[in-house]
Image: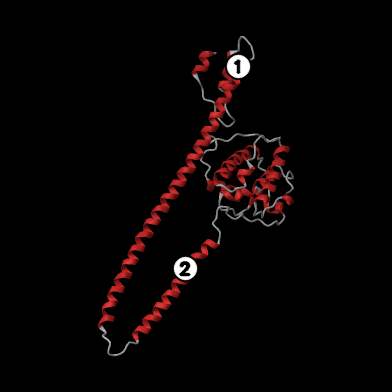
Amino acid sequence: MAVNVHATSVNTGAFSRNDMIEWVNDLLKLSYTKVENLCTGAAYCQLMDMLWPGLVNLKKVKFDAKHDYEFIENFKILQSTFKKKKVDKEIPVERLVKGRFQDNFEFGQWFKKFFDANYGGHDYNPEDRRAGKKVAAPPSLNEPPKKGRTKPSGMKAQSTGATTAASGRTRAAGKTPTGASSSSATTTTPRKGGGGASSSSSNAAVAAELKEKNIEIEQLKAEREQLLLTINGLEKERDFYFGKLRQLEVECQEGTETLPVEHILSVLYETAEGFVQPESDDEEQHS
């Protein structure tokens, strides 16, 4: 039977996204580049095999999965191992297979704590256990389609064609009769050069502004992720303390005339696994 754990923003510490990817790659000899790659479920299946060698039939695990229905098959295998080891953690499969960072990061944090609580430190060769099965990180589910990247190339081709045509017209204009005044050609040259300089300056200003906006967007995204983690931790802590009060409420409604003070205090001061209970002067006074 596995040791069950509960992870919150408090007891997971400063386990960052980079820490998570390095941890998975180091243990399983993989080359994942981001947390979202865990959405296939394959890494979790092999980590369970690492905890309990032989628990998982790795031949059935799709390490090169690229589609959500393949991800789901891997998570079914993971659910089966959880059931065998009586792990009480619910796997949010529908959210994980969508490849969003937040869902996969939260589950990965829990799994790291679960792994540390159950790993015995024995030797394990992940590549031998995979028996040469091909491992591939899934494509980004939020990546824009490749067709969208061909548009600038097409626009460039049109621009090149227009430039060529304009160049041809310029050469044709150069074949004017010798009687024509050359002063007009001389006066147009400064105007063309001035327009080009103005356009280049404008483009540079737009590019600089766009770069600043992109940096600001990335900063806001990072702040949003941190806020979501904080909110998630607060919600879990809220549920934890609500559960305490609900437990006492039920016991008070059972009809007993008196409840032992020691029992009430034990419920109030009970903590989730991983927390260190602080010393309390109030407890000594009540006792």
Image side of residue 176 versus residue 156, left or right: left
Image x and y of residue 69, in percent: 67, 50
Q: Give the amino acid type for the residue marked by disc 1 in the picture.
A: His
Q: Is residue 28 visible?
A: yes
Answer above or below: position of 60 versus 113: below
Q: Is residue 22 visible?
A: no
The disc, 1 or 2, on the residue closer to the chain's N-terminal end is 2
Report the number of numbered marks: 2
Q: Which residue in the structure is indicated by mark 1?
A: 263
Q: Which residue in the structure is indicated by mark 2?
A: 155
* Quadrant in which the N terminus is drawn: top right
Please identify the quarter of the rendering in which residue 90 is found. Answer: top right
Image side of residue 106 versus residue 73, left or right: left
Which residue is situated farthest in the bottom direction here?
A: 178
Image x and y of residue 98, in percent: 60, 48
Q: Give the amino acid type for the residue marked by disc 2 in the picture.
A: Met
Image x and y of residue 89, in percent: 64, 36
Answer above or below: position of 85 versus 140: above
Residue 39 vs residue 264, the one in the foreground: 39
Answer above or below: position of 44 versus 287: below
